[in-house]
Amino acid sequence: MTNSDDLWALEKKFWTEGADGIHHLTAKGALAVLPYPAGILVDQAIWRDNAVAQRWRTVVFTEPVMTHKGDVAVLAYHVSAERADVPIYEALCTSTYLRDENEWFRLSHQQTPTAQQD
C-alpha cells in the first residue's frame, strides 16, 4: 500500500534538503530532465550538477496528482519554489518512484518551467 502523504513529503525533501540528506533516496541509474543548461542527467551526474545542488528555501506544490500501480508511483504537480536573490521558479513536474523492499526511491524527475526564467 502507498501512503501518498509519505511520497509527497519525500518529494518535498528533494527540493529542500541538500544532496547528503536525500542522495540515498535516489534509485541507481535514476535520471532527471531539467531546464537548460542542465538538460538530461543520469545517475551520479544528477548530484554533481549545480542546478540540483542548490536547495530551495520554500516550495509549494499545487495541482497534485498521484497514480500508483504495484511498486511504481508517479507524482505530477505545479511547483512554486523560492531561494534568495532569484525570481520565484515555477514549473510543471513529474517524479517516478520505485518501491524496493518496502522503501521508495526516486527513479526519474522532470521539470518544465511554466514561464521564461531569468
Image (cartoon, grey):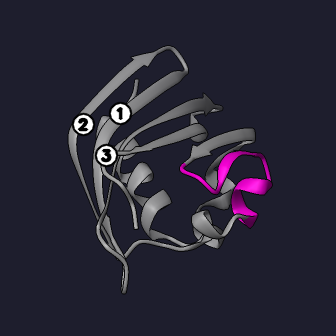
The answer to if 40 sits in the magenta stretch is yes
Going from N to C along the chain, the mark reached first, 3 or 2, is 2
Residue in the foreground of this view, choosing between 58 and 105:
58
Number of the front mark, 3 or 1? 3
Circle 1: residue type = Ala
Label 1 Cα neighbours within 10 Å, binned few <14 / some 14-19 / many ≥20: many
Q: Label 2 vs label 1: CA separation? A: 6 Å
Going from N to C along the chain, the mark reached first, 2 or 1, is 2
32 horizontally vs 68: left or right: right
Circle 3: residue type = Thr
Counting from the top left corner in percent of width and height, residue 16 is at 43, 68
Residue under circle 3? 114
| Position above or below: 84 against 114 | below
The answer to if 42 sits in the magenta stretch is yes
State the extent of the magenta-drawn residues as a range: 35-48
Residue under circle 2? 64
Going from N to C along the chain, the mark reached first, 3 or 1, is 1
Q: Label 3 vs label 2: CA separation? A: 16 Å
| Position above or below: 89 against 77 | below
Label 1 element class: strand
Label 3 Cα neighbours within 10 Å, binned few <14 / some 14-19 / many ≥20: few
* Residue at x 40%, y 23% (from the top left corner): 1
70 horizontally vs 11: left or right: right
Residue under circle 1? 76
Label 2 element class: strand
50 horizontally vs 1: left or right: right
Q: How many marks?
A: 3
Name the outermost residue toward the top. 69
